[in-house]
Image: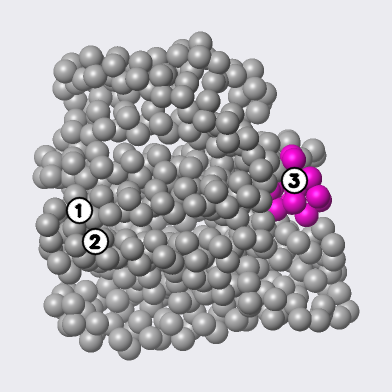
Amino acid sequence: MSFSERLARGVKATFGANALTMVANAALIIVLTRFLLTPEEFGELNFALSVLTVASIMATLGLPKSTARYITDFAETDPGQIPHIIRRSLVFLGAVTVVVSVGVVVLGRPVARMLGEPSLVPFLLIGAVYVAARSGTKFLSAAFQGFNRVTWTAVVGVVSNVSRLLFVVGFVLLGFGAVGALAGYVAGFLLAGAVGFGVLYAKFYRQYEPADDVEEGLTRRVLEYAVPLTATRGANVLDKKVDTLLIGVLLNMTAVGYYTVAKQVSDFVAVPAASFGFTISPALGEQKSGDRLDRAARLYERSLEYVLLAYIPAAAGLVLVAEPMIQYVFGADYIAAVPVVQVFSGFVLVNAVNKVTSDGLDYLGRARERAIVKSTMAVSNFLLNLVLIPRMGVVGAAVATVLTYTVYTGTNVWVIHSELGFSVRRVTRHVGVVCLVTAGMAAVVASVLPMVSGVATLVGAVFVGLAVWGVLAVVGGVLDVREVADFLA
């Protein structure tokens, strides 16, 4: 299979899995918000998930991504080292995960009391298993990415998210409430982990004959490279979760529910870019390892152009349809989330650009620079949230996220440009045409919005916008239908 065929297959598999995941998650959020949980209970669940996600950073320490990087490197140069990399990484990961999981159990009650939320105690007790299960699936996703076989990452994701929907709804209907919903998340991770580790052992680990001698310093190199990755991932999760945590502490759990709905919408829209970025990241590293920087630069440039073509209009469209979407999809109880969704339209754009940029830096060996910038932005986001949330409420948290993430993404693009040297002039010219396409699409969507009276007409308005975008993009010369068709064939 050629490089381009393998890349296309990976993108399609990842996008298909992420699309299915997106549908499952959307169904889960809609069922929870409209039928099963109150805004306060929904906010409480997501506050607990934010706390546990931050805890899970300490349980992985960047080891999954570091493992993936060295799997990619040694697959080209010394495949016999790969079994050693996997074994040793799993030993360290398991040890750290056990320590952190025990810590969650021991510290759960005093932390809940300190936050003034004793109802969080049962969440944190179940959270010990959540942390361990989530760490395992993170390792699997990164390992399959390192082997450049992201189709298996997609399989693990589908199993986790589809089963999560069934488990969460089932446990809540059995009367376990928001705590049962968290148990459903854990069950989904455990099932996905069982499938994923079986595949990793049978289809990858056993295919490599271990080298007689472990390369000198291999373990040290894996652990050392995990340090900046830990800083980056820790800063990334803190950056994404600190706003939710501060809203819960400074405002209330109902406000967390509003904010979570808005953020989930932006995450759903980011799925295509995430799929593309996840697939091209190891491909960029592979091209660099093969001393094919020109090819890597062209791959990134085209990826960036297509992401901008899709997400500049998407951000504008989200601003326009935010109110009817919240009203008809999530329910009138969440109408206060509308301005948050509109502010997050800016995050949708910069996040999409970052999805095809940031992971590539890890595979290009620039994790240290990314870690420095991300850590700085995470601290800035925390401080901005402290200032803006008391003054602007939930909207202030969204503004802080958009501002800091824009700076972070711009810096990442600059770093990858210094590494690959893609054409800034060509990308800038492309953006100009895309903005004209967006203006035409937005005018048409705005004209049909007064006719929206429910979910069906809302979907119709979205499809009208997509059709206008497609026609204008082709006419403007920024969308090559034949190129896209060949890629998807």
Q: Where is residue 87 in the image (x, y as percent from the top left)?
A: 69, 76
The image quadrant that residue 324 belongs to is top left
Q: Which residue lies furthest to the right in this view?
A: 212
Magenta residue span = 283-295
Q: Report helix, strand or loop for mark 2.
A: helix
Q: Mark 2 points at which residue?
A: 385
Residue 322 seen in this snapshot: yes
Q: How crowded is mark 3: few (under 14 residues within 10 Å), some or many (20 or more)?
A: some
- Asked if 263 appears above or below 76 in the picture, the reply is above
Q: Is residue 477 above or below residue 232?
A: above
Give percent across and percent down for residue 333. 11, 45
Say if the magenta span includes residue 374: no
Q: Distance between the residues labelled 2 and 1?
A: 7 Å
Q: Which of marks 2 and 1 is nearer the N terminus?
A: 2
Q: Residue 111 carries which label?
A: none
- Which image quarter: residue 349? top left
* Disc 2 residue type (three-letter): Asn
Res. 293 mark: 3
* Mark 1 Cα shell of 10 Å, populated few (<14), some (14-19), many (≥20): many
Which residue was labeled with disc 1?
Answer: 396
Measuring 63% from the left and 50% from the top, which residue is drawn there? 418
Q: Nearer the viewer, residue 115 or 414?
A: 414
> Left of 333 or right of it: where is 229?
right
